[in-house]
Image (cartoon, rainbow, N blue to C red):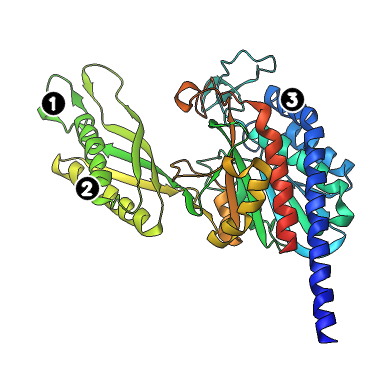
Amino acid sequence: MKVLFTFFLLFNAAFTLLGQESLKKQMAAEAEGLEDKLIAWRRDFHTHPELSNQEFRTAEIVAKHLKSLGLEVQTGVAETGVVGILKGGLPGPVMALRADMDALPVSERTDVPFKSAVTTTFNEQQTGVMHACGHDSHIAILMATAEVLAKHKTELKGTVKFIFQPAEEGVFGSGKAFGADLMVQEGVLENPKVEAVFGLHINSQTPAGAIKYKPGPEMAAVDQLYIDVLGTQTHGAYPWSGVDPVTTASQIVMGLQTIVSRNVKLIDNPAVVSVGAIHGGIRHNIIPEKVSLVGTIRTFSEAQQQLVHRRIREIAENIAKSAGAEAKVKIERGYPVTYNDPELSEKMRPSLEEAAGSENVIGSTLVMGAEDFSYFAKKVPGLFFFLGGMDPQKKPEEVAPHHTPDFYLDESGFVVGVKAFCNLIVDYGNQ
């Protein structure tokens, strides 16, 4: 009797597995059938980009689509975010899929017919608004994924949360939480409690349809650096009559470069300390009272982050003191390290290979860019991967990088993102 019962369990498991494999193939075919619709959505979002926490039109379109699929929909999450909940017909885990929705203050220079003509005032400057990081494709891919999965609601194991997140690019300076951080604080991973979260990012310098990811630390933690160098104003012809914050600030900039070259153990993890802007002075013959530096810090561990922060303060304050000036250093912590759970990464690799082809799933190196998907992955196991958006006939150095006016995506690989998301949900549900 025991042997018969064991045989029955094995037969049932095999039958279920075959059924789920058939389901994934059916979903893949349906994803292919949605490609034109997916691209049309993406182009519409590209033509109508919206900055962080201003994604009103985008959120309305997303919410309307999710409601049409019969999902439970929440709006106004973390300002302008949208969350859709799809409850499968079979018991299983709660999983989340995430797409970010905001654009950038960049004036588009491409000649595509769906080019953005939107303009705005940002930081007191007139600028264009552009989806120069590909978030328009993320929205469209997740909308298409929701449509495919909703069609097979009764066959799905578990529950899927579709997280359409605002403000990934940031709303800095307000002192308030935003984006993924605020979504987590508002309980987006609770009620029902999420077990695993998946996300993707298009990449303009990876061949279309290819997938890249790295288990463990993948993307850097980012911090904002502000240094005010205070001197004594004087006539430019008599520098000895004051304390020059310009030369002092210049020495600080050069001193900061020794942190990476001399203090960081680069054989473990890289780091970056970059000064992006220097402001000071008003006239050629006046030595000003103050010079301000702003910059960015990138690290891959808490210990490394603490080391870099400490050395920035020591170098800036002591160089200023040696010149008779004063340096006031402020460091604002930004996104944490984006960390791919190693066990989850290994388990889900076959899902990605089935979507893109095993030869098209590539190991990634550390990425100095930062992502607030990291807030989700700090709370529950996460897997964040890059989806190629480059013409396969071109080389990475021949195409424009992200956050630039000439940023361009080859749309032929978008459907791979839909297949990958569907596979991850089906396969994780079966585990």
Q: Which residue is mark 1?
A: 239
Looking at the image, which is closer to me, 234 or 189?
189
Q: Earlier in the sequence, mark 2 or mark 3?
A: 3
**Residue 392, located in which quarter of the rendered image?**
top right
Contact (Cβ within 8 Å) of mark 2 with mark 3: no
Disc 2 to disc 3, C-alpha distance? 49 Å
Disc 1 to disc 3, C-alpha distance? 58 Å
Q: Which residue is mark 3?
A: 44
Amino acid of disc 1 = Pro
Element type where label 2 sits in the image? helix
Amino acid of disc 3 = Asp
Element type where label 1 sits in the image? helix
Residues packed near mark 3 inside 10 Å, few (<14), some (14 to 19) or many (20 plus): some
Element type where label 3 sits in the image? helix
Asked if residue 54 can be seen in this view, the reply is no
Vertical arrangement, residue 353 with respect to residue 394, above or below: below
Question: For the residues carrying marks 2 and 1, which lies nearer the camera in this image?
Answer: 2
Q: Position of residue 64 (x, y in %)?
A: 84, 38
Q: Earlier in the sequence, mark 2 or mark 1?
A: 1
Residue 262, labelled with which disc?
2
Looking at the image, which is closer to me, 165 or 356?
356
